[in-house]
Amino acid sequence: MVRVLLNGKESVFSESQFKNLGELYDRIAPKGMVLKRIIIDDQEIETNKLSERLSEPLYDGERIVMDFVTPQKYLEDMLPSILNYIDTVINLLPGVAGRVRELEPKAFKDIEDLSNAISALEDLRQSVQVIVPVETDGSTMVVVKLKNFLQALEKQDMSLIADCLEKDMPQVMRFYATLFEKALSKLREART
């Protein structure tokens, strides 16, 4: 038998009822809710890594804990750490620019990480806009600055890349921070 604790309520299933964890998940996940936490046999699984585990079979004696929240609550809980992350990135940008000017190999990994972060922030911005519509003043400026950065990368102009990292990227990151702060404020106001 598989014991499932779903938002504090326990259910018991036969492991033979489901082909795998994904089938169980699809059957019991509440519609319109977001998975906040999953623990399988005392091992917490990062929710963004869950897809890697969905094809795994269920085992007799397995204990699965799942906590779901509304998309609004999930964002409200997540956005403060995103804002801290953005502050950290802004503070690291001058060092990255210096490494680019010195042609340090680590600088290229830093640029790749920054590009991935911006892509993730843009994906998050789109999701936030669906859940909590917020005015996006400055989005044209962000597009221009990102295009300038991409052009500098394509030209492999290290001086221009460093300048973009110091001058443009902090403004881009502040754009996202401002938008997420507005969304967080709206979420908190709606709760009170």
Image (spheres, grey):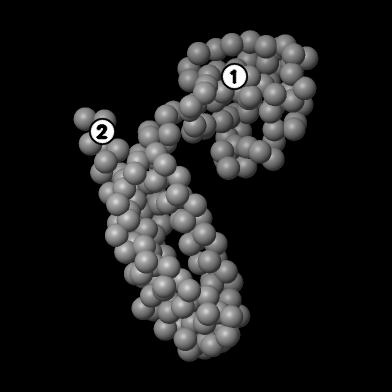
Q: Specify which label sits upstream in the sequence, 2 or 1.
A: 1
Q: How many marks?
A: 2
Residue drawn at the location 69% of the way across and 40% of the way down: 52
Q: In the rendering, at what x and y percent does residue 77 appear?
A: 38, 39
Q: Element under label 2? A: helix
Residue drawn at the location 70% of the way across and 24% of the way down: 23
* 106 is higher (above) or lower (below) than 139: below
Which residue position is annotated with label 1?
28
Measure the C-alpha gap from mark 2 to mark 1.
Answer: 28 Å
Three-letter code, disc 2 = Ala
- On residue 190, the disc is 2
Report whether residue 123 is seen. yes
In this rendering, position of residue 148 left or right of residue 50: left
**In the rendered view of the protein, which quadrant contains the N terminus?**
top right
Front residue of 190 and 158 = 190
Report whether residue 107 is seen. no
Three-letter code, disc 1 = Ile
* 135 is higher (above) or lower (below) than 66: below
* 2 is higher (above) or lower (below) than 105: above
Q: In the rendering, at what x and y percent does residue 41 appear?
A: 64, 26
Q: In the rendering, at what x and y percent does residue 5 appear?
A: 55, 18
In this rendering, position of residue 182 left or right of residue 60: left
Q: In the rendering, at what x and y percent does residue 91 appear?
A: 37, 69
In this rendering, position of residue 152 left or right of residue 80: right
